[in-house]
């Protein structure tokens, strides 16, 4: 299981199955549900406990099967299962099931297991991981109309885990913490996306195009503006998708400045954001939308910036 985790982790952060490159977010946080700020991957060691928990339940609930009769004859021999301890010479897998029983004791009583008609691995897993605090930005990051690669960058922004200059300086990797796009202030998450003159220009054009003051002074306030507006559900989702795309392309522009020492004109970035969003929204319109929304979308498509 540790090896499977290592492969998944390497693949997420480097695209390869073997890599020691450190990730931007700890694996434990990656493996929490999306609503709690993670990527929603499963913690496989706990899932394994939950899956083996099914055997613990089957023994406790005295289900009848050939395996159970065999287990009773060879190991348990009529002893009380809940307090049963395996002998030293028991097989590896039997000791493992007994270990799982000890873990199950923390979340279930013997009575609860006995009363259960069916055992749900999913439910047991949820109990093992416990409930954590919900984050208020999952609606924005995991919006259906947002492109998956944009979602991933937005997720890193919300976790404040992009490799921005200030973070790299604090890690001792670089000396200069200044913003690569304007060179006047420290490059922080807030600065790149909401205070940098470059981004402000991009955001201004985008807001004008959407006919909505989309950008507040942070992602939080921008999302709140959208979600508390009197727009239809479809328009709100579209606005959040545009916000996500703007974040993604500003980050791309910043990387272009770092790695290729070039900054394209604002018009070019705005055009790219518009084109990607319109294409995406047309390809995944999630449900029947009203004629009003249809014409709103058509107007947005027709008023995109021209850029050769
Ligand atoms: Zn800047």
Image: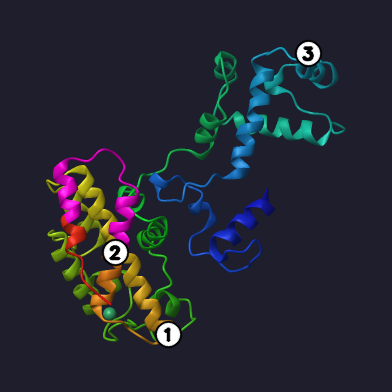
Q: Answer whether residue 276 is magenta in the image.
A: yes
Q: What label sits on residue 275 in the rendered view?
A: 2
Q: Quadrant of residue 27?
A: bottom right
User: Does the closest atom of ligand 1 sit within 8 Å of the Cβ of label 3?
Assistant: no
Residue 52 rendering spot, x and y as whole percentages: 66, 31
Callout 2–callout 1 Cβ contact below 8 Å? no
Percent x, y of residue 89: 87, 33
3D distance between C-alphas at marks 1 and 3: 73 Å
The residue that label 3 is drawn on is 78
Q: Nearer the viewer, mark 2 or mark 1?
A: 2
Query: Marks 3 and 1: in contact by CB < 8 Å?
Result: no
Q: Name the N-terminal-most of marks 2 and 3.
A: 3
Residue 90 in which image quadrant: top right
Q: Which residue is mark 1?
A: 260
| Residue 283 sits inside the magenta stretch | yes
Q: Earlier in the sequence, mark 2 or mark 1?
A: 1
Q: Which residues are magenta?
A: 275-298
Q: Can see residue 137?
A: no
Q: Quadrant of residue 162?
A: bottom left
């Amino acid at each position: 299981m540790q090896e499977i985790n290592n492969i998944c982790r390497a693949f997420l952060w480097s695209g390869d199955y073997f890599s020691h490159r450190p990730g931007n977010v700890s694996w434990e946080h990656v493996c929490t549900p999306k609503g709690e700020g993670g990527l929603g991957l499963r913690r496989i060691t706990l899932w394994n406990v939950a899956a083996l928990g099914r055997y613990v339940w089957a023994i406790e609930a005295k289900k009848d099967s050939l395996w159970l009769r065999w287990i009773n004859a060879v190991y348990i021999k009529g002893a009380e299962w809940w307090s049963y301890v395996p002998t030293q010479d028991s097989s590896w897998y039997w000791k493992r099931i007994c270990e799982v029983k000890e873990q199950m004791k923390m979340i279930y009583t013997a009575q609860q297991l006995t009363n259960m008609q069916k055992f749900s691995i999913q439910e047991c897993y949820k109990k093992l991981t416990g409930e954590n605090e919900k984050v208020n930005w999952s609606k924005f990051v995991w919006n259906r109309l947002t492109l998956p690669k944009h979602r991933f960058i937005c997720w890193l922004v919300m976790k404040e885990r992009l490799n921005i200059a200030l973070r790299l300086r604090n890690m001792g990797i670089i000396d200069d913490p200044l913003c690569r796009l304007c060179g006047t202030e420290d490059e922080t998450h807030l600065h790149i996306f909401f205070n940098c003159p470059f981004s402000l220009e991009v955001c201004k054009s985008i807001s004008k195009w959407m006919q909505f003051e989309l950008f507040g002074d942070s992602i939080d306030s921008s999302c709140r503006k959208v979600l508390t507006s009197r727009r239809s559900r479809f328009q709100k989702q579209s606005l959040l998708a545009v916000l996500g795309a703007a974040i993604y392309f500003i980050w791309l522009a910043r990387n272009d400045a770092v790695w290729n020492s070039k900054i394209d004109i604002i018009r070019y970035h705005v055009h790219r954001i518009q084109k990607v969003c319109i294409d995406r929204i047309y390809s995944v319109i999630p449900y029947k939308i009203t004629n009003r929304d249809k014409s709103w979308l058509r107007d947005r498509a027709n008023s995109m910036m021209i850029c050769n």
